[in-house]
């Protein structure tokens, strides 16, 4: 830089930051951040003399993600151009564009930097940039830790624009009204996968318990998702604020005499509440979970409030297929009048509420899990609905927003990509996801049952650092839809099964076996399969890899995904050919 500055004195006004570690993201540090007159250059240097195509792809995505995150989460970068540059130190003569990333050899770096010299342009405040706040979107687990350690969540533009604060405020207002007027209120919060429903529930429980000052243990967060409960309890080292809904109802439901200490219950994934038949099979009494909750509320002294967090299209268990209709039936059978708070789009489903207060602040429509990929949920919907033209259109938008989706038939290549991309990033998580019904994966050494993560050890799988043998980053154990629902990974590898195959015209799932005597048959088994893949395909924050095993039964599925313009990771044979060409 000194030599370059002698030739171009204007460069002396630039600022260079080495190993700029992104705050709150341990291990993520671009090699160089260069502040010019009017833009930010992010430089990542690699000393690989002959990187494979998979490694190159991972390197390019790594520096592109640095630039995108600085653009989005760095307060002083929102109105600046942030440009990613990848430099291969041992590849002279190299200069190419790979999407938004410029890939250079060491001898081409000088001319590239001098192209940004603009002495006459006004220069932004470099010191203010270096001191500006960097507020990355936290994972659900890290957000929960912050809340319950009494630390403020970062003020993130995306979370603010998604309406999280307004949703929590609406719930707090409804709780105050219920408490002050001695009433019973039911509030339903709807949202697409990753929209922050669980975070809303946790923030609301925290606000009622800590900020409202109306007594400790005023609210409790309940979930029927055993792995989610395990992960949150493991992260918080606390089993009081987050509890399993089924254990809660075993203790207090079915007209038991004992009443809970809390007057507010937040039920995560409330659309998955068990119907009466499922409760009869599991707990021995024919009362649906919605009826159990409303009867319990009617017995509470003075007032009660139930908040139902409603995920859309994520019913995956037998006994969950009744959806929201079960809550309307429970309202009809309740001894006490209930006031309903809900988004306008579902209020027509609740004819038996005593009064209805429409509130669209209770509808979360923007995905927070997938960082910038606002259209991810729409793409997954189009993919699973067989809407190929729409899916092709949406994948282009998703990629432009910074969410990477790759296709491969080689699991080892997929593993190489994620390990290379996140090398040294201690807080990043990647892992294997698969449908619980994907029996074909046994043929490639993956077994959803014997190599699957069980609910009780989901905490270490999601939370432990990458080198820990129990961590998801070891890429040895699978998480099924039942384990990963409501949770997230930075870059999952979704392993496709023969339980959902493309036939050339539509998606097909196997006919279920005849159940054993006394076992319940799902009302719509195909819908449960489609919903399982909807869950698997919406877990990623930075992107995902779709791994379709090289099995004849999945050839049409692979061809269909190819036709949706998904970029493919290079195969090992292609990498081998590259190396042969290099040596000759």
Image: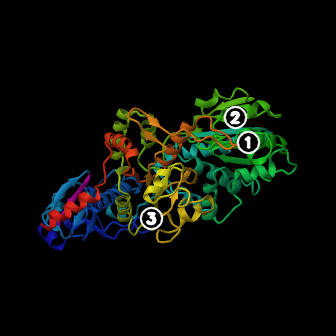
Q: Residue at x 40, y 44 (%)?
A: 553
Which of the numbered marks, if any, corresponds to residue 289?
A: 1
Q: Is residue 145 above or below residue 564?
A: below
Residue denoted by label 2 = 326
Would you say residue 419 is visible in this rendering?
yes
Q: Answer whether labels 1 and 2 touch (C-beta < 8 Å).
A: yes
Number of on-image labels: 3
Which of the numbered marks, if any, corresponds to residue 25?
A: 3
The location of residue 314, given as percent across then percent down, is 56, 42
In depth, the one of 342 and 6 nearer the eye is: 342
Give left or right: position of 485 versus 21: right
- State which tag comes first along the sequence, 3 or 2: 3
**Mark 2 Cα shell of 10 Å, populated few (<14), some (14-19), many (≥20):** many
Q: Quadrant of residue 109?
A: bottom left
- Range covered by the magenta-colored residues: 100-105
Would you say residue 13 is visible in this rendering?
no
Q: Is residue 82 above or below residue 271?
A: below
């Amino acid at each position: 830089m000194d030599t370059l500055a002698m030739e171009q004195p204007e460069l002396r006004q630039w600022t260079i930051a080495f190993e700029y570690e992104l705050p709150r993201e341990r291990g993520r540090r671009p090699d160089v951040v260069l502040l010019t007159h009017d833009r930010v250059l992010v430089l990542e240097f690699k000393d690989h003399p002959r990187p494979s195509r998979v490694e190159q792809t991972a390197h390019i995505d790594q520096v592109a993600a640095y630039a995108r995150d600085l653009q989005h989460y760095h307060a002083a970068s929102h109105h600046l151009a942030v440009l990613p540059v990848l430099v291969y130190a041992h590849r002279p003569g190299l200069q190419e564009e790979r999407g938004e990333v410029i890939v250079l050899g060491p001898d081409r770096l000088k001319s590239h930097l001098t192209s940004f010299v603009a002495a006459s342009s006004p220069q932004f405040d470099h010191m203010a940039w270096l001191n500006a706040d960097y507020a990355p979107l936290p994972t659900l687990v890290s957000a929960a830790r912050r809340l319950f350690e009494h630390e403020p969540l970062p003020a993130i533009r995306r979370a603010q624009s998604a309406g999280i604060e307004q949703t929590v405020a609406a719930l707090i207002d409804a709780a105050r009204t219920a408490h002050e007027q001695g009433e019973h209120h039911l509030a339903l919060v709807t949202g697409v996968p990753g929209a922050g429903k669980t975070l809303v529930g946790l923030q609301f429980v925290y606000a009622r318990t800590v900020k409202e000052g109306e007594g400790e243990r005023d609210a409790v967060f309940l979930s029927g998702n055993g792995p989610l409960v395990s992960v949150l309890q493991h992260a918080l080292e606390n089993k009081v604020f987050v509890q399993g809904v089924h254990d809660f109802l075993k203790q207090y439901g079915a007209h038991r005499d004992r009443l809970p200490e809390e007057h507010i219950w937040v039920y995560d994934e409330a659309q998955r509440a068990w119907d009466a038949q499922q409760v009869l099979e599991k707990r021995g009494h024919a009362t649906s979970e919605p009826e159990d909750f409303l009867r319990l509320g009617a017995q509470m002294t003075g007032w009660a409030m139930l908040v139902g967090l409603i995920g859309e299209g994520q019913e995956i268990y037998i006994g969950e297929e009744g959806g929201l209709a079960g809550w309307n039936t429970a309202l009809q059978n309740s001894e006490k009048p209930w006031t309903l708070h809900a988004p306008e789009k579902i209020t027509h489903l609740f004819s038996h509420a005593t009064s209805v207060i429409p509130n669209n602040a209770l509808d979360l429509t923007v995905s927070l899990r997938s960082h910038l990929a606002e259209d991810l949920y729409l793409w997954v919907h189009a993919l699973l609905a067989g809407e190929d033209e729409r899916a092709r259109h949406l994948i282009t938008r998703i990629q432009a927003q910074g969410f990477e989706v790759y296709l491969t038939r080689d699991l080892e290549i997929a593993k190489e990509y994620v390990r290379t991309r996140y090398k040294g990033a201690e807080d990043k998580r990647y892992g294997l996801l698969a449908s619980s019904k994907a029996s074909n994966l046994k043929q490639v050494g993956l077994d959803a049952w014997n190599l699957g993560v069980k609910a009780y050890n989901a905490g270490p799988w999601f939370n432990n650092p990458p080198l820990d043998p129990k961590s998801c980053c070891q890429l040895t154990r699978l998480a099924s839809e039942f384990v990963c629902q409501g949770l997230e990974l930075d870059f999952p590898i979704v392993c496709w099964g023969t339980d959902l195959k493309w036939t050339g015209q539509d998606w097909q799932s196997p006919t279920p076996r005849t159940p054993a005597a006394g076992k319940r048959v799902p009302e719509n088994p195909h819908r449960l399969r489609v919903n399982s893949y909807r869950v698997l395909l919406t877990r990623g924050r930075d992107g995902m890899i779709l791994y379709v095993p090289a099995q004849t039964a999945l050839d049409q599925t692979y061809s269909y995904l190819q036709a949706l313009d998904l970029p493919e990771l290079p195969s090992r044979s292609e990498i081998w050919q590259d190396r042969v060409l290099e040596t000759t």
